[in-house]
Image (spheres, helix red, strand yellow):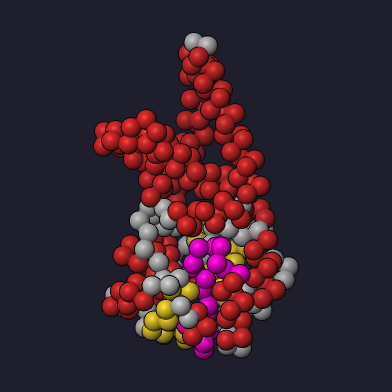
Amino acid sequence: MLFRKTAILGVGLLGGSLALALRKKGLTEEISGFGRSAENLEKAKARGIIDSCHPNDPAGAAAGADLVVLATPVGAFTQIAKAIKNSLKEGSVQTDLGSLKGRLVYDLQEIWPRYVGCHPIAGGERAGIGAASERIFEGSRCIITKTGKSDAEAADMLAGLWSAAGCRVEFMDPFVHDEVYALVSHLPHLVAYALVNTVGDANGDLIEFAGNGFKDSTRIAMSSPELWRDVCQLNRDNLLRFIGSFKKNLERIEAFIGNRQPGELEREFDSARRLRSRLENENENESNR
């Protein structure tokens, strides 16, 4: 057992799933939960995800915990970290599940002595405790954003935790992380939201005619608006740069269509198809390992 008591601050899809994984793997004995909704916490307790509920009391949840996990929307991280700083058990390890790192990692390191940032690349379109499952981490990546100031022992413990949960652990600079995931995660979410709203602008009732292609392309538009609002604000510069690049690609396709250039259009699509096929090859290689 790595941690006798774990505090999950934000018991939703990822926080609840981590709690379940920790239990299944025998990595913790007791789990306390913090959240804004007492009803949600009671549901989590009824499912055996957490042992104790601390609505609107992050310090109470964190008291005596050997591991403290931030799993709220990233915009609340710094405020919560400051609120519970004096309640932390000496020697405890602190981490988060956020998809944003960058400057935030360094800010949290100034508040919490043994904080190391983590980003499990897992989840789904369904949010909330009802969708929590210990299996969502199996076969996924977990990025650990260790810095020169990170506690080495804490980083090793977290690497062991995520490996036990079924993740492939990789280490990455916090700012590099934000650039990479602005491109392969954050931008796709914005495109999915914009695509659905484009249908809404034309006629929202037409959504019922959508097939699997539209459903696959826009599945992530079911994600939490609050969470992605915070991501857009905190990864603003990277996102603005890649939105500009995306617009240029769309404008190029628009020009090929408008100028009746089917050959150029086909080459554009083929280039994307060949790059996208690398993901299928990677998945196949992973399943053969």
Q: Nearer the viewer, residue 91 or 193?
A: 193
Q: Position of residue 63 (x, y in %)?
A: 52, 87
Q: Is 108 inside the magenta-drawn segment?
A: no
- The residue lying furthest to the top in this view is 260
The reply, left or right, for residue 234 in relation to residue 205 is right
Q: Is residue 173 above or below residue 244?
A: below
Q: Position of residue 23 (x, y in %)?
A: 38, 77
Residue lying at 58% horizontally and 48% vertically, measured from the top left: 182
Q: Position of residue 108 (x, y in %)?
A: 65, 70
Residue lying at 47% horizontally and 62% vertically, measured from the top left: 167
Instruction: Report whether residue 233 is seen.
Output: yes
Quadrant of the drawing holding the C terminus: bottom left
Q: Position of residue 73 (x, y in %)?
A: 50, 63
Q: Is residue 119 above or below residue 203?
A: below
Q: Is 67 inside the magenta-drawn segment?
A: yes
* Range of magenta residues: 61-78
The answer to which quarter of the image holds residue 81 is bottom right
The answer to which quarter of the image holds residue 91 is bottom right
The answer to which quarter of the image holds residue 234 is bottom right
Q: How many marks?
A: 0
Residue lying at 41% horizontally and 85% vertically, measured from the top left: 29
Instruction: Report whether residue 171 is seen.
Output: no
- The residue lying furthest to the right in this view is 148
Residue lying at 72% horizontally and 71% vertically, measured from the top left: 149
